[in-house]
Amino acid sequence: MNVVVNGRDLELDARATVEALLVELGLEGPYALVERNGEPVERARYAETPLEEGDTLLVARPVAGG
Amino acid sequence: MNDPLTIAGREFRSRLITGTGKYPSFETMRDAVVASGCELVTVAVRRIDLDEVGDAITDWLPEHVMLLPNTAGCQTADEAVRVARLARAGGLPDWIKLEVIPDPRYLLPDGEETLRAATHLVGEGFTVLPYVLPDPVLQRKLEAAGCATVMPLAAPIGSGRGLKLRDTIEIMIEQAEVPLIVDAGLGAPSQAAECMELGADGVLVNTAIGQAADSAAMARAFAQAVEAGRAAYHAGLIDESQEARPSSPITGVVTS
């Protein structure tokens, strides 16, 4: 399955979830923030939110700022 | 003295809020946050660079401090709402420092879009802390919309110029119904003390600490200034006078 994450094409397992994607990227920490096709994904649902072919994902996190 | 800052029912012992930007390193930031004694720190939300993930800021912040995500970088209400929703969905607090800033030169906020975003976010259950130009009329509207604080700027972000719109901020302090936090533009602890002496409920400082030669020492200095200013506010400042008022007796002068 092919998805786009932060503008980059990624190939994932056909049954991948949001959580699996974060693990794949090494971003399974406490504050990886995810939008799937423009909609925010609740942290509690990362493990049960399946990805689909062609999904566009944005992965963000808190950074230094004022 | 037990004089906590209460925002949306949550008590903070320190009336100093700090930003986490502009530090030369996470280590310097952590030391300054600890030295400041603050319990609320702002963070921005940014997409992760997959080529250079690096450390997470949360690994470097003391556990007792609460994160206050901001909407820095947003130029419209819709963008700010999107960032707030993303932050909350991903597990950050449902508090949002609302910044809607279309102007890159002076970084002055758009009051109309800020009010629109605030109204929407309050409706979605967020605790909203809006960053605004000093404007007592907008303050009333934001309070009516349900904002938890109103945070007028002292001077443009990062400018270090101090309380440039003092008279207007005094009006806001006088009529405030929710905590009034002076946010942005403070360059020196004395300026933070001035805000607190006027009766501001707190101040938010970032650049003046992050860019100081010794950030931890400057953080401590700001904390002391905020405490001193607050104590002076409670103690009651004297009225100003155009003429001198002698401190020593004017009768019985030895040489007369």
Image (tube, rainbow, N blue to C red):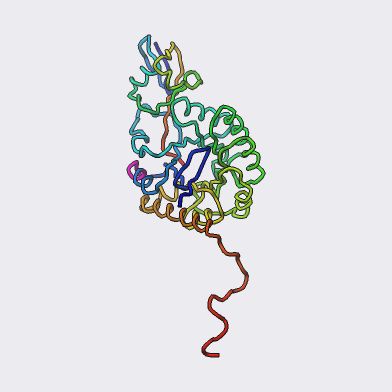
- Quarter holding the C terminus of chain B is bottom right
Report the residue at 33% width, 34% height from top.
Answer: B55
The picture places residue B153, in percent across and down from the top left corner, at 55, 47
- In the figure, residue B252 lies in which quadrant? bottom right
The residue at the far bottom in this view is: B256
Report the residue at 40% width, 51% height from top.
Answer: B219
User: Between B96 and B238, which is closer to the camera in this rendering?
Assistant: B238
The residue at the far top in this view is: A14
User: Between A43 and B10, which is closer to the camera in this rendering?
Assistant: B10
Report the residue at 43% width, 14% height from top.
Answer: A49
Task: Give the total of numbered labels.
Answer: 0
Report the residue at 38% width, 18% height from top.
Answer: A19
**Magenta stretch, residue numbers:** B24-29
Magenta span includes B183: no
User: Between B119 and B10, which is closer to the camera in this rendering?
Assistant: B10
The picture places residue B139, in percent across and down from the top left corner, at 63, 43
User: Between B2 and B52, which is closer to the camera in this rendering?
Assistant: B2
The picture places residue B189, in percent across and down from the top left corner, at 46, 55
Left/right placement of residue A31 relative to residue B193 reads left
The residue at the far front in this view is: B2
Helix, strand or loop for the magenta stretch, by majority: helix
The picture places residue A62, in percent across and down from the top left corner, at 42, 33
Q: Is residue B135 above or below residue A45?
A: below
